[in-house]
Image (cartoon, grey):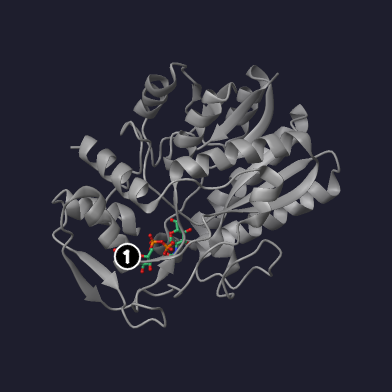
Amino acid sequence: MGKILLTGGCGFIGSHTAVELINEGYEIVIADDLSNSSRDTVDKIETITGKRPLFYEIDVADAAALTALFAEQPIDAVIHFAGFKAVGESVEKPLAYYRNNLDSTLTLLETMSRYGTKCFVFSSSATVYGDAEPPFSEEMKTGGCTNPYGWTKYMIEQILKDAAHADPSLSVVLLRYFNPVGAHESGLIGEKPSGIPNNLMPYISQVAAGIRDHLNVFGNDYPTPDGTCIRDYIHVVDLAKGHVAALGYGLAHTGAEIFNLGTGRGSSVLEMIRAFETANHLTIPFEIAPRRAGDLPFSFAKTEKAEKLLGWKAQKSLTDMCRDAWTFEKSCH
Ligand code: UD1
């Protein structure tokens, strides 16, 4: 059996998926340029699993470097996590986002084609549903993204569907993530944003750690029960297990298939603050601030398709997410 290539395998979701794949007996190869992650993640994965993944420090848009990797390693499938993901930055630097995110995907597909690798699992996002009415289901029309980051996900989905259509022996699995939070229960790997966090959970964790004095709640006048936005938060370890299931599916089927990876449950910003406080016995000071541009009131998944075809369902609670996020945050100081 060949190996599984994880691009961006040192990142937040990639590293957790590396652990779950190794636990399931897969041999993995990580390719990461470390632009938003660090090399010691490879050591942490080894500490957790007892197995050291192979590691290549390369940019997967670099065709020569990627070719050298494929020439050395037999690759059965690629899980493509690597990509730029900061929404605000994508508005400032759209060309960098389109260049990086699209180029890496195209280079991977071309290289896979030369080496006969037939399975591609892609990190897409619930952002492709735009302002459609939740719960979001896989067959809904996509588009209407509010930023270039979202459009890169939308465009890459299209590229992959077209590639699968043109080559019936190819298998493409598009995974639409909802809001991944939490960390591995060991506290060894987790989400480590550089600079001021954009996302809610890392921001709450940094307030708890005393790095920021309060959380700004972006808007409390949305048409939701408490006025703050509703999101479908999913524990990153559940999400990682979803990748193991999706990979098994991809290796056993051809064609393109799309799966939501969410819990199907929505929680408001105020509920998240309360859950974090209760799980960790501390207080999160917050202030109500103006709405953030591009935020939608509701987002949550329809989860039946993944349950039915992948046999996968998120198991962990909000308490687990908040406890594990805090354990990881504390381990960083
Ligand atoms: C964001 C992106 C989404 C991307 C995802 C993963 C936007 C509009 N969407 O999702 O495309 O796939 O991150 O990186 O940016 N909040 C606060 N205070 C904060 C931070 C967040 O109140 O300091 C609120 C937000 O208004 C939102 C909720 O918390 O209602 C969740 O925000 P966030 O964690 O940034 O995720 P999304 O916006 O859902």
Relative horizontal placement of residue 190, taking residue 244 as reference (left or right): left
Examine the rendering and report whether any part of residue 110 can be seen: no
Residue at position x 76%, y 31% in the image:
114
Q: Nearer the viewer, residue 198 or 105?
A: 198
Examine the rendering and report whether any part of residue 208 can be seen: yes
Q: Position of residue 214 (x, y in %)?
A: 17, 63
Residue at position x 56%, y 37% in the image:
60
Relative horizontal placement of residue 206, taking residue 271 as reference (left or right): left
Q: Nearer the viewer, residue 108 or 310?
A: 310
Q: Position of residue 13 (x, y in %)?
A: 47, 42
Q: Is residue 65 above or below residue 284?
A: above
The residue where tag 1 is placed is 271
Q: Position of residue 148 (x, y in %)?
A: 52, 64
Q: Identify which amino acid the numbered label 1 is placed on.
A: Glu
The quadrant of the image that shows the N terminus is top right
Q: Nearer the viewer, residue 42 or 321?
A: 321
Q: Position of residue 152 (x, y in %)?
A: 58, 58
Q: Is residue 57 above or below residue 273?
A: above
